[in-house]
Image (cartoon, grey):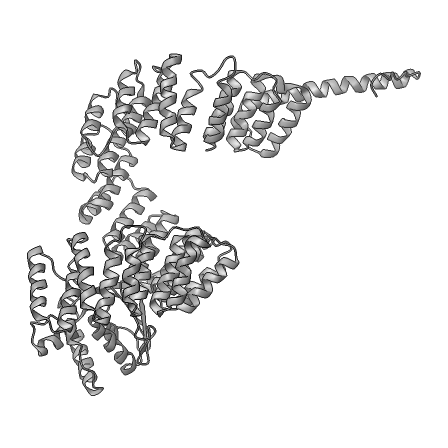
Amino acid sequence: MPGVVFVIFDSNLKNQWMDFLGEMTEVETRLKQLALSLLKTPHSIKCPKHLRSIHVVLLRTGLHHSSFAVGNFVSCCANLGLMYYATQMFDKMPEPNSFVWNTLIRGFQQNHESKKAMDLFDRMRIEPDGPDRFTYPFVVRSCTELMEHLRGVCIHGLLFKVGLELDTFIGTSLIEFYGSFGDTKAARRVFDELPIKDKVVWTIMLSSCVNKDTGLKETRKLFDQMPGKDLVVWNIMIFQYIKAGDIQNAKLLFNLAPVKDILMYNTLLGGYARHGEVNIMLDFFHNMPTKDLVSWNSVISGLVRHKRINEAITHFHQMQSENIHPNEITLVTLLSACAQVGALDTGRWLHSYINRNNSSSNLVVSTSLVDMYSKCGDLDSARQVFDKMPNRDVVAWNAMIMGFSMNGQSKTTLQLFNRMKREQVKPNEITILGVLCACVHAGLVKEGQKLFDSMDQEHGLEPRVEHYGCMVDLLGRSGLLNEAYSLIQSMRVEPHVGVWGALLGACKLHKNVELAETAMSHLNELEHEDGGYLTIMSNIYANVGRWDDVCRVRELMKEKGIGKLRGCSSIEVNGVIYEFGAGEKVHERVEEIYEMIDEISGGLGVVGHVGRRSEVFFDVEDEEKDEVLMYHSEKMAVAFGLISMEKGSVIRVVKNLRICGDCHDVMKVISKMYEREIVVRDRSRFHHFKNGCCSCGDYW
């Protein structure tokens, strides 16, 4: 207790007490020395437990008064992302100096807590010393991260007042700040005024001075003026050309580079993969002196982008033979390729490879597997992967919901959506879109309307134009054309071609010519390249016998130089993807395919099938119409499947357009005639044909 004096009469006890106090002082001294030695190298402290121990030592030994100790402790906290301890220690300091202030501001900015960095800056401004040249670079970067343009401009003005506007480090941050807002003129002014320009300043300026008005001209001038260009700068300039899609100049600059590293090769290879000719990309790839995983990923993604799936798989196998192990990007790219063309066998092989290499626990890879199986029409496998996922984020839920939706499992989609909400996973706009599509496929008007209304009221989501398009499609297909048109007129956003196209399709279904003409007038204003809508309009006129209007629309298509989009269908057989166009005779087994089509045609006659000739141009004879219908791309693909796949196996076809009514009827007949399940994925949904019936219930 205060004021109480303990008198020790026993001399032995007194000596023991003094020894104990001496030991305590020695321990404290050693703790101080240990703490200071550790704090001299902040990056060496990598364990939060050690940091907490040092935190206690600093407080107990009085080192929290030392600017050196506290400043280095804050650096340790920043490296470990534990700014809470840094703030606690800072608040204990009676008079922190500018070193401690700056270190704390830098720590917040580096840990993406820029709002706290700016609040601390405002506090520092009223201190006697105030901010200095080491403060402002992090303050300007915080404005960049917070996207606070006005505040950044104000701080730039403040720099003129304090005489720091010509500091090289601050100027570098300002150039980066203005560049992030696309204000290249302001960035260039800062650059030109700097008396000393180091490599960092030049590099940041090169990365920031591209805009839509000057393009790459100013950047190239700056590049040519820069002294002592290193590999980093050459790579940046080549990348700027790649980003702009200018492969030719990127290649010319690549050839001029005095030294080339793997990064430069990969930069140009990535440009070829995105914007160039695939054969040039392959030649460049095969001539590269060295290749790493990035190189292989670039060429595989380039092949996938150009839909050369077989070659992408071949390169994947070659990559493995050269002991290059795939990563998440490789696997996701290949799975998306399988999803694109419905390559289920290849997708299953990739799944087994993923399991063998313990990659199935990766959330992104597992989600890609769900997406691949769903888009190949194998919902059972998709569900198995989904159920085994230990953690499911909204992207995984969306993949499964979209899978059930596009496969016509509308009730299951709604059940899955309700389960998602029960598990307290917040849906986003894509989730709602998937469920709305399920309502469209099944004609669930009340459910769709309720879900659409809940977007704003229950989930706090603003309907996008795609959601309106779904609702127009849902109402229109159900015959509620006036309600669909009223919804378009009340939209909060400008209707796009998909919205008016949905209304036009509904008008074709219900033979409403007047409203179709209204939709078509808006489509003509919005769409100038796609002739699909004009084709629909000509069919609407043809269905009601208005042949003069059909001729007028056909003439309009000729004037615009547009025609019906080429229909093509793909099928996987024994791990190889085959593509068919309508009536094409390029396949090596074309004679067998045509014989099978003739056999199918004979069977259709037996069961009394009559072709839907309205699907063919009106100025073609009936006999020719029947022939054209029989050689649609999906029928060619199915015929090839029948002659090349084992009896009883599922035939899976992917088509780039919506399946026509005649092909839909024929697929039902084939499924019963040959006792085969046929799965056709068109551009909007799946059709599972079995025993003469389709999963869509003839509503699509």
User: Residue 663 falls in which quadrant of the image?
Assistant: bottom left
Front-most of residues 608 and 642 = 608
Percent x, y of residue 305: 25, 51
Front-most of residues 99 and 453 = 453
Percent x, y of residue 469: 30, 58
Identify whether 495 is placed above or below 191.
below
Residue at horizontal 35%, vertical 17%?
Answer: 168
Residue at horizontal 46%, vertical 63%?
Answer: 416
Q: Is residue 373 visible?
A: no
Identify whether 610 is placed above or below 507.
below
Percent x, y of residue 496: 25, 53
Identify whether 526 is placed above or below 15.
below
Number of marks: 0
Q: Is residue 623 visible?
A: yes
Quadrant occupied by the N terminus: top right
User: Image check: 559 left or right of 223?
Assistant: left
Residue at horizontal 29%, vertical 62%?
Answer: 484
